[in-house]
Amino acid sequence: MTSLRAVIALAVLACFAALALLYHPHLPADDAVPEIITTGKVETEATVASVQRHVDSVLQATILRNLDPLFDQEEERTDQFGTWIVRNRGWLVPANRHPSAVSRRIEMLLTENHPEQIVYVTQTAALHFEVRIYAGARLASTLLLKPTLERWPKLSGDRPPLLSVVLVLAPGQARSTRDWLEQSHPFALALPAFDAFSLRLAHDAVIQRKEVLVTIDGDDDAKASLSAIPHITGAVILEHPAGIPGQFSTMLADRNLLVLDPDGRRLPTSWRTTLREASVPIVTAELIAEPSDIDEMLTRHHHRAQQKGASVLLAMATDEIAPTVLADLAEAARRGYRPAFLPEVMHRLESGLAP
């Protein structure tokens, strides 16, 4: 009986073995298996290229063909996987179209059925709309939409837009600017902290009911600069300040002072973080540094105030720039804008009280 059971068991095992040979797929020999290597670099580069092709095909055929091209540039970027090319392009949007509407349309077309594409839309201080298109963590393309603006936008609402102008003086220039203080409308002077004539001009400015700030330029010690001139309401950062950011921010906060960062590029990131943690207001404003910039930047100044309720503009206090800027401020007052000092402008911007 035992031998019979053993024979039956062997037969069953033989059947299972036959079935396994019949249905189990045969594996190839080890040398026949191809080597497949997929790296992050290859995948990312392919994705960047596909995003750029999608941008070209979709946008050029729908939206961008109706806009006037401004520039088309390529920029090389590098990360841990290697290098790739970012394509940067800009267009001028006609007066009958608004860049915000165009940018929203672009965002919708790019993300529709393409979830791998990440799109960010931001408005710059120059009122341009920037569309940044990412493939994963890599920037693939940027699209800059520049509006066509008339010099004076139509105002609406009961609350007049606020305009703040800050004339930035260079060292040695203070003695030649006293005639500008006779302007009846409010504006501000940003004075070099340790210039020989700054104290006298600051006194004259306060007597004439003008606002006073201090400039911090390069090697100037930030904390010492704040103590050099009385009656200031803030500081204009012209170059990377020296000193310790914590002491600077504490002094600003204790005196309720604000910081103006021209073009948003002069204040180091570590300082900006420290100031924000201390609740010090930081204002990013355009700076008119050349006479050729006057018309375009004044136009944007008017439109920012009309859209946001208030605007701040910095201008170098030269004979070629300052008289034109002050004359524009007087004309703006006649057209329904209201020249104002920086604290009131900051309150309007922070509260979001647009006209």
Image (tube, helix red, strand yellow):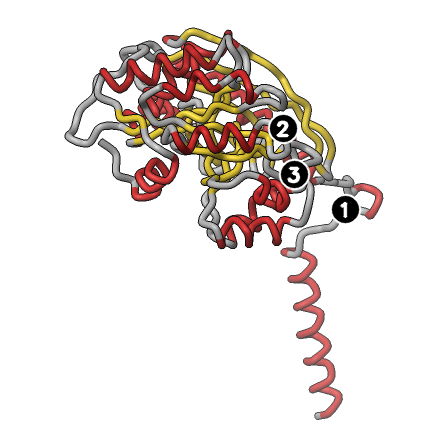
Height in image: 247 above or below 19?
above
Tell me where residue 48 appears, x and y as whole percent: 59, 28
Q: Residue furthest bottom?
A: 1
Quarter location, residue 67? top left
Q: N-terminal of the two: label 2 or label 3?
A: 2
Which residue is at a point 34% across and 18% down the rendered structure image? 329
Residue at 47% in and 27% down: 189
- Residue at horizontal 34 percent and vertical 35 percent from the top: 345
Secondary structure category for the residue under label 3: loop
| Percent position of residue 352, x then y | 29, 40
Residue 241: assigned label: 3
Q: From the viewer's perspective, is the residue at label 1 or at label 2 nearer? A: 2
Mark 3 closeness class: few <14, some 14–19, many ≥20 residues within 10 Å: many
What amino acid is found at the position of numbered circle 2 in the picture?
Answer: Ala
Work out whether 316 lies above or below 23. above
Mark 1: few/some/many CA within 10 Å (<14, 14-19, 20+): few
Vertical position of residue 235 compared to residue 149: above or below: below
Identity of the residue drawn at 36% across and 19% down: 183
Residue 233 in view: yes
Q: Which mark is residue 80?
A: none
Earlier in the chain: of badge 1 and badge 3, it is 1
Q: Quick one: label 2, few (<14), some, or many (20+) residues within 10 Å?
A: some
How far apart are the alpha carbons under marks 1 and 2? 88 Å
Q: Quadrant of residue 75?
A: top right
Residue beneath label 1, please? Answer: 28
- Determine contact: label 2, label 3, CB under 8 Å: no
Give the Cα separation between the discs numbered 1 and 3: 69 Å
Q: Nearer the viewer, residue 27 or 8?
A: 27
Total numbered labels placed on residues in the image: 3
Q: Quadrant of the N terminus?
A: bottom right
Say which residue label 2 marks.
196
Q: Nearer the viewer, mark 2 or mark 3?
A: 2
